[in-house]
Amino acid sequence: MRDFSYLRASSADEARQAATQAGIMLLAGGTTLLDLAKCGVMEPETVVDITHLSGLGGIEVDENGARIGALAKMGQVADHAGIRAAFPAVSESLSLAASAQLRNMATIGGNLLQRTRCSYFREPDVFPACHKRNPGSGCSALGGVTRNHAVLGTSDTCIASYPGDLAIALVAFDAKVELGGRTVPVDDFFLLPGNTPERETVLERGEMITAITVPASAAAKNSTYLKVRDRQSYEFAAASAAVGLEFEADGRTVRDIRVALGGVATKPWRARGVEQALIGKVLNAETIETASRLAMEGAVSHGANHYKIELAPRVVARAILKVGGLA
Amino acid sequence: MTRTIHLSLDINGRRHDLDIEPRVTLLDALREHLALTGTKKGCDQGQCGACTCHVDGSRVLSCLTLAAQVEGRQITTIEGIAAENGELHPVQAAFVEHDAFQCGYCTPGQIMSAVACIREGHAGSDEEIREYMSGNLCRCGAYNSIVAAVREAAEMA
Amino acid sequence: MTIMEPRKHGDASDGTVGGRQTRFEGNLKVTGGATYALEYPVEGLAYAILVQSTVAAGRVVKVDTGKALAAPGVLMVLTPDDDMGLLVASDWGGNRPENQPYYPLPKQVQYNGQSVVAVVAESREQAIEAAKLICITYERTAHVASFDDPAAGEGKVMDNLTSGWGDAEAALAAAPVRIEGEYRTPREYHVAMEPHGLTVKWDGDQITVWEPSQWSHGMARSYSEWFGIPYENVRLISPFIGGGFGSKGAALAHGAVAAFAARKLGRPVKLALTRPQNFINYGGRAATRQKIALGATEDGILQAIVHRGASETSTYADWPEQTGAATPILYKVENFSSQHRVVPVNTVTPGALRGPGKNPSAFGIENAIEELAYKLGMDPLELRLKNYADRDYQSGKPWSTRRLREALTEGAEAFGWSKRSHEPRSMRDGRQLIGWGIGCGTFPVIQAPSEAMIRILGNGRVEVVSGAIDMGQGTYTILAQTAAEVFGIPVDQVEVHLGDSRLPGSAIAGGSMLAGSILGAVHKAATAARDELIGLALSDEKSPLRDTGANTLTFGGGRIAVPRDQGPSLTLPELMAALGRDEIEVRRNTLPDGATPQEHHQAWTTMAKVQGPTMGEYSMHSWCAHFAEVRVDEDFGTVRVSRIVSAFDCGRLYNPRLVESQWRGGIIMGIGQALLEEGLVDLRNGRTVNNNMGDYLVPTNADVPDIQVISVGVPDYGASALGGKGVGEVGIVGVAPAIANAVFHATGKRVRDLPITLEKLI
């Protein structure tokens, strides 16, 4: 990795101030930045270590929802009793991510900003063409090995999938990202690649994620995160679903349902079509299966990733069956 | 010449001073600069767990941690968990007894991970041990014995 | 039936051959005290990093080194223009072309990822940064990325791997029941936890190499030949090795580069391959494909096997991954035909990976035999027993021992095979389809001459000294047990020194040949040392045992005594003190008497003296039968192995505790092979793109169920001096087909190409 200077921020303001300059990157858990610096994908001139800042790692849960400081560790949030009780999908998405060690390092803020696992993005020497890394240079993934690439939200410039788990749960439950000066819904925080795949979020230079808030809801309380992958553990999702459900008083008719998908899209993917198809309906295997297929509206495969179009609706359906008490 | 910084690291209860480049990871600082080679480099990419050590009691990957980041923290490596008199930590002893390794290269990371796994309360069942030890790959395939060793050490703890 | 249940050690039998002694070097490994190759403190180190080609074929036209040389800390850049003055070293067999120059950083690029430049700097970080500044211009030529590319052609037939008897084609045509299938395995990688690399230091024309090695003597020979220095001038040190699985048996180009850089710089150099380079810079298991046709009678008697296989090799060397290796010996068949081809493509030359040949071969025949069983409507266990090979039909020789029948029947009993429901998709638990399958495995008994030294020290300690390697199989432990048994002393009175080319020569730690080979030499040396000691004790005038009238002595419980307690007894240090001796040193080998020094050198540094499984009057092999249970999610296609019982005939087990670990290790690697492992090649440029442990998946702890292993073997003194057969390789052989067969039983889908990933089942 390229030589860089190391600065330890003494306050959030100082970190933000430093980050207004080009070439300066904030260092939190380091699990993305140092990994990609070793790959030659990220080349900071200076890293500003924010892990020693106090006051940004709190986890508060009350009847209105949760507020999670940006520097809270994935593992702390996963094991937090209040989060587990009010937002099981959030807790599960974290427990099923990475490994125990990585969860002890990676922060919540950093986790949202993790970069794609596209093999072509990660190997600049061998595959110089990558619009995400070097706008205008091309896309090496198109026509290459695409088993793990996205089928939703892709564009002619980029088919890299968003690799995270937590953001899938967050987008399902209308979480917001606090950026110091402003607050943005997680769904709007992430951008589709379009013609600017290098721009993955709305985060501006000099901004820093300070916290994430998740509003409490009956659907969030009755939720799950289902992750399907080749290996039993320590792997990114082939397809995953965060689902939350609230029934009407009859215990069968859907009042509120939230569905989001991971492992299949270029950003955390809220499947509103599935939700709308089920609200007001009585849940049964058939309605679930029919609605789940709507999750793949607009999906495009690129050869080896075609299986995701088959797989993802089944993952959604299973997760709905589970929260609906039908599995 | 590339820039260097001075660090004072607290490792296994001892202070170690060193001048290194800011980009040096904790793993390379241990292995290349401090002759603490018990912590292993398997992938250098956060994918295998061989470099696991403890920072403030929490298990982390030293390959994705800058040495500069952990100044002021308490670092524990495999060299620091046996008793002063050389008596093995119960997890170490259980690994020997259950033959929970072959080549031994992933072993320090497995043991550091196991010590933390038990302390975290994630060693309640074989299934839980398997999941919470899955960040430590073992290509020799000692997994059955690792689970047995962690289970036994957890029961004794 | 012997089911090996772990138990606390401490039994008196542990310190003898066959006891369950815990790992001799265990404490070093659990405390971080075991020192691996890249961990030796060497003063004044420089760090080397390799730069690899980004094209699959062509020529390096120009290397712009200016920016790299100007970067901080850079000491040297080596390019294809640097003539290192090296000569090609011998191949495995010890054959060497005369005065052929060797270019470890070649101009001609033969595969994507070939090392073409090296950067040496004061620190590893500086070398890595400077390596990114190297700019290479290539003249590209057309490449072939895979043997499935029509441009690859059919490849060339390996005549030495063609075999046949009877009239297989005619018998197949006449058989009332036939099946035919094509079975495929992808490129697979070793993924040893310790990356390749070395530290190397010159003192004048003497070179010391700290490098992980499965064969210290063989690799030392390469260094001496590359650099044109006497063999004695090379010292290769490798007392601990972080896994090899076949990858660390030969010195490789990066070793030559590091050694040359160290000599040119006049200071020691450390070169570590990055993890991606460990996938690309040396060969894993070649991709294979094989067509198998079986013909049988309606009651399931095999009439014919016709096998046609192929594997990928590089454009510059023929490495056959022999798909017909297990095919001829697993079943009784009167008509047989097998042929294997190698197909050159632009890849690094493939290499040996656990169970070479036998492994992909078993994937073919063991799938095919179950396909036949289902076609016949017969229990696959019954079909296997019905066609049990009473002798080796290929060599015509009787088996030395073959307890595959016991492996099948006792394994079946432990597994509960009799409760099986025959129909596919007939066993389920909710959305999980459950299936059972069998896979048999085999690996030949191979032996090589070896040498060992025993030293009895004045303090009573006994040293076992050998250049043999312990990469986790247990060499330290079983050699200590052997010496302890011969001298009747506790294991902790024994010291074992291994892994150094200056020590007595040994078989490679590979091909499951080391234990049987080196144990013979150690046992011979130890008994000779004991005999010498007895001779001295009964004849030396200072010996208290001299006048007892005994004509031999007993060794046990740490004491040396006259038989039937008719006289005094002494401990080893007491006897040595009485004899006034500081040391008794005895060196023995298993070469024929009168072997010349040249034959000695050849024996330890080449494979020329290796004895194959049918070179004597018997056909000698290890055998196993795996019983696998899988659970397949019928919606997601995910396969999880929920249970494995494996029964082995590996002859006598020198240490069952360690053997069980090796068996389980092989089985777990087989689970990875069956379900996860596959090198994915971008056909456009021939690059393996999943060249890391996050994308090339090996099993985690959570992927592995409790595995029950059973020994059904009996001592086979035809196979080795102490009755053991090979242990390490056979464990993986047959696992993948057992799982594939179980997946078929669960789902009704026959997946003939590995790995069995979810998209093949949904």
Image (spheres, rainbow, N blue to C red):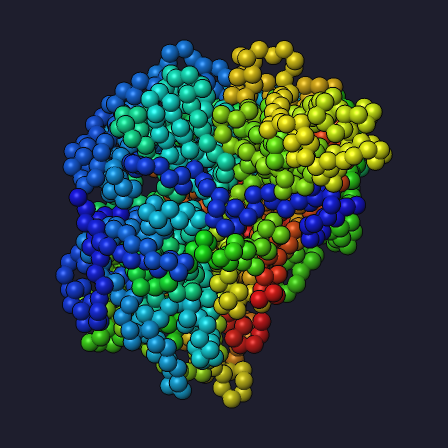
User: How far across and how far down the image is residue B128, in percent?
Assistant: 56, 64
Judging depth in this view, the residue of A40 and C552 nearest the camera is C552
Judging depth in this view, the residue of C509 and B96 nearest the camera is B96
Residue at figure coordinates x 48%, y 72% from the top left: A224
Query: Is residue C650 rendered to the left or right of residue A11?
Result: right
User: How far across and how far down the image is residue C212, in percent?
Assistant: 46, 35
Where on the picture, by quarter, is residue C63?
Answer: top left
User: How far across and how far down the image is residue C294, in percent?
Assistant: 68, 32
Up/down of B29 relative to C220, above or below: below
Judge whether residue C310 can be spotted in this image.
no
Up/down of C681 relative to C307, above or below: below
Query: Is residue C346 rendered to the left or right of residue C675?
Result: left
Residue at figure coordinates x 41%, y 82% from the top left: A217
User: How far across and how far down the image is residue C351, in percent?
Assistant: 49, 30
Up/down of C336 relative to B105, above or below: above
Residue at figure coordinates x 19%, y 59% from the top left: A24
